């Protein structure tokens, strides 16, 4: 969830937020996120914040902190963070959107959200620019998780393919 930047974008766009489950394993970013949410109680009336990352399973992993929005799971990371599978932590939370820009761990995190995705068919906004193979692997994974249930769109929000996002829109919305 970084520091709440996406939530701020929704607020600025006038998008109503009913409830948020946000995950941020970097302590500095989590503190900023928590303070941001606390400053916006009328715009974000129901927020549950988790000081952990999302992954295919609930485990602890090496993490490189202090990189701002680029903090990430890394074999070089000198810190250990708790990571969780979304299916383990919020199995009955019915999101209408899942947004992931998690520095290359998107595939693992989607695998940890198979039940939520297949059951609730939320819209998905998944970054696919961290690794070239994510351009095809992530759409194929979503199709495997929820066969025939999504239409796929891709948009590049910055130059040189940075901030390229795969949007998966439920055909049953």
Image (spheres, helix red, strand yellow):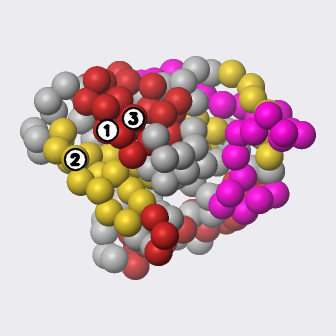
Among the 4 quarters of the image, the one containing residue 16 = bottom left
Q: Is residue 103 left or right of residue 114?
A: right
Among the 4 quarters of the image, the one containing residue 98 = top left
Question: Is residue 20 something that shows in the picture?
Answer: no
Q: Which residues are magenta?
A: 66-94
Q: Is residue 11 left or right of residue 102?
A: left
Pointer 1 residue: 139
Q: Residue at x 31, y 32 (%)?
A: 140
Task: Classify the position of the N terminus by image quarter.
Answer: bottom right
User: What is the x, y in percent for residue 131?
Assistant: 53, 46
Q: Is residue 149 highlighted in magenta?
A: no
Among the 4 quarters of the image, the one containing residue 79 = top right
| Residue projecting furthest to the left | 172
| Marks 2 and 3, the one that precedes in the sequence | 3
Q: Residues within 10 Å of mark 3 (few under 14, many from 20)?
A: some
Q: Residue at x 16, y 33 (%)?
A: 149
Pointer 2 residue: 152
User: What is the x, y in percent for residue 130?
Assistant: 55, 50
């Amino acid at each position: 969830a970084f520091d709440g930047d996406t939530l701020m974008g929704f607020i600025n766009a006038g998008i109503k937020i009913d409830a948020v489950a946000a995950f941020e394993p970097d302590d500095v970013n989590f503190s900023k996120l928590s303070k941001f949410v606390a400053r916006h109680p009328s715009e974000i009336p129901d927020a549950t914040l988790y000081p952990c990352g999302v992954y295919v399973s609930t485990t602890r992993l090496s993490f490189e902190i202090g990189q701002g929005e680029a903090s990430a799971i890394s074999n070089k990371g000198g810190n250990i963070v708790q990571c969780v599978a979304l299916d383990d932590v919020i199995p009955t939370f019915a999101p209408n959107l899942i947004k992931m820009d998690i520095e290359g761990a998107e595939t693992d995190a989607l695998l940890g959200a198979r039940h939520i995705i297949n059951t609730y068919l939320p819209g998905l906004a998944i970054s696919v620019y961290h690794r070239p193979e994510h351009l095809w692997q992530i759409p194929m994974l979503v199709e495997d998780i929820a066969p025939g249930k999504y239409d796929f769109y891709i948009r590049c929000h910055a130059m040189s393919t940075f901030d390229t996002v795969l949007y998966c829109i439920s055909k049953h919305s």
